[in-house]
Image (spheres, rainbow, N blue to C red):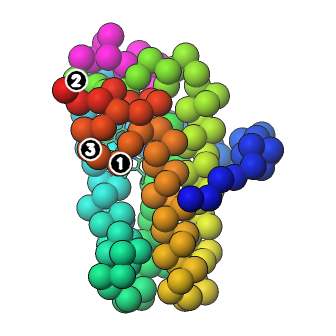
Amino acid sequence: MIRKPLVALAALTCAGVLWMPMMEARSASDPATIVKERQDFMGTFWPSYLKEFAGIAKGASTDISGVPAKAAGLAADARKIVGYFPAGTGRDAVPKSRARPEVWTDQAGFEAAAAAFVKEADKLEAVAKEGKLEAIKAQIGATAQACFGCHEAPVKGGGKYRFEEK
Ligand code: HEC
């Protein structure tokens, strides 16, 4: 597991250039629809990207030809996360949501966790272009690890910003 210095993280967050919440990522305005869209969106990370990456990381596949394009897609989607969490879309408004109140009460921490994920996805995109299997495997691990900054891997698992599914 790779630990990033907090300083680097803070610098990244302050830079603000790499990190711009994209509110246009969502089209709806009523909280229940936003939550539905956000859960559908979060649900795409595994089938669209991580599933293929996990096969490579575990050694089940050595075909890395698709990684550069997938990593670019992941990096683009990573930037959309924060835009799916407008104020007023927590569990108090939409009981189906598993977003913890900390998403909004600790917004800086939440955005930093999202920025850390963007950073690792960007790094994966860069490493993928170099085409070295071992380096790609290591960076896949670091990227997946960045999901855990917000919640655990098991889909029902909880975490800092997500309630466990009972
Ligand atoms: C910045 C924080 C953050 C990061 C980073 C993050 N998630 Fe999430 N994720 C959340 C929150 C909060 C929810 C709960 C949303 C809700 O229920 O309203 C969630 C929900 C989910 C869900 C459940 C969707 C559903 O149908 O209810 C999945 C699956 C998921 N995330 C996968 C991932 C994967 C895979 C990664 C990394 C590639 C990742 N997440 C990175 C915050 C994050």
> Mark 3 falls on what kind of element?
loop
Q: Name the residue under label 1.
A: 153
The disc at residue 155 is 3
Q: Nearer the viewer, residue 72 or 123?
A: 123
Asked if the stretch drawn in magenta spans residue 140, the answer is no
Find out whether the residues at labels 3 and 2 contact each other: C-beta distance under 8 Å. Answer: no
Is residue 53 left or right of 128 when viewed as pictured? left
Q: Is the magenta stretch mostly helix, strand or loop?
A: loop
Q: Among all residues in the image, which is located at the extreme left? A: 166
Is residue 56 left or right of 114 when viewed as pictured? left
Where does the image place residue 33, in percent across and percent down from the top left? 25, 28
Q: Distance between the residues labelled 3 and 2?
A: 15 Å
Q: Among all residues in the image, which is located at the extreme top? A: 92
Which circle, 3 or 2, is nearer the viewer? Answer: 3
What is the crowding at mark 2: few (fewer than 14 residues within 10 Å), some, or many (at least 20)?
A: few
The amino acid type found where label 2 is placed reads Lys
Dot 1 beta carbon under 8 Å from ligand 1: yes
